[in-house]
Image (cartoon, helix red, strand yellow):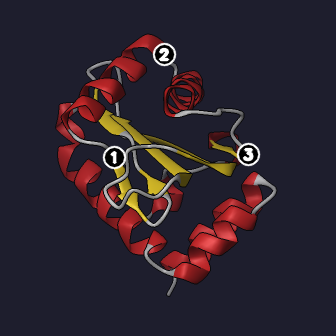
Amino acid sequence: MQLTDLLHPDRVRVPLRAADKAQVLAEMSTLLAERAGIPADEVLEAIEEREAVLSTGIGLGVAVPHGKSAAAARLEMVCGSTTTGIDFDALDGEACRLFFMLVGPEAAAGEHVKALSRIARVVRRDEIRQRLLAATTAESFIQTIVDAESL
């Protein structure tokens, strides 16, 4: 599985309009819900439930809010970036500007873990993070992921 299998331009928002963590979670949950055809409140509930356990701010300015929801028929993903850093309670204390949100059913747990691993692999490279942050269109954001996954 490639991240680009889960992404289409209508699932990427650059920049996000959100100004804080709660707004990022709400905006991205709404975007994911609209694209997946599931209730936004169920997406947000799944994300907030996981976020309450431990922040999904993984470091290096990246957050990967994710959760499991029976409302999702399959693993769904949306992405975005912000022009300024958002305090996301990241493990390294850094503000986050890159966001990848995943929601799927329990049955997609293996695919969910693979997607989390692929995201971590893609964003660990400084050059890729910089290109994602510089992307001004959904297409250029996705192209950067395509390029990163081909390395």
- Lateral position of residue 66 relative to residue 5, left or right: left
Gap in angstroms between the C-alphas marked 1 and 3: 20 Å
Few, some or many C-alpha atoms within 10 Å of disc 1 (few <14, some 14-19, many ≥20)?
A: many
* 122 w.r.t. 24: above or below: below
**Dot 3 lies on which element?**
loop
Q: At 27% from the left edge and 60% from the top edge, which residue is drawn? A: 114
Mark 2, secondary structure of its residue: helix
Mark 1 or 3, nearer chain start: 3
Sequence-wise, the earlier of marks 1 and 2 is 2
> Taking 48 as reference, is 84 left or right?
right
Q: Horizontal and vertical percent for residue 88?
A: 44, 43
CA gap, disc 1 to disc 2?
A: 19 Å
Residue at far front of view: 93
The reply to whether discs 2 and 3 touch (Cβ–Cβ < 8 Å) is no
Q: Which residue is mark 1?
A: 56
Q: Secondary structure at mark 1?
A: loop
Q: Position of residue 50 (x, y in %)?
A: 25, 33
Three-letter code for the amino acid on which mark 3 is drawn: Pro
What numbered label is drawn on residue 40? Answer: 2
In the image, taking residue 57 as reference, residue 7 lies left or right, namely: right
In the rendered view of the protein, which quadrant contains the N terminus?
bottom left
Is residue 5 in view from this perspective? yes
Type of amino acid under label 1: Thr
Callout 3 crowding tier (Cα within 10 Å): few <14, some 14–19, many ≥20: some
User: Nearer the viewer's eye, disc 2 or disc 3?
Assistant: 3
Residue toward you, 8 or 22: 22
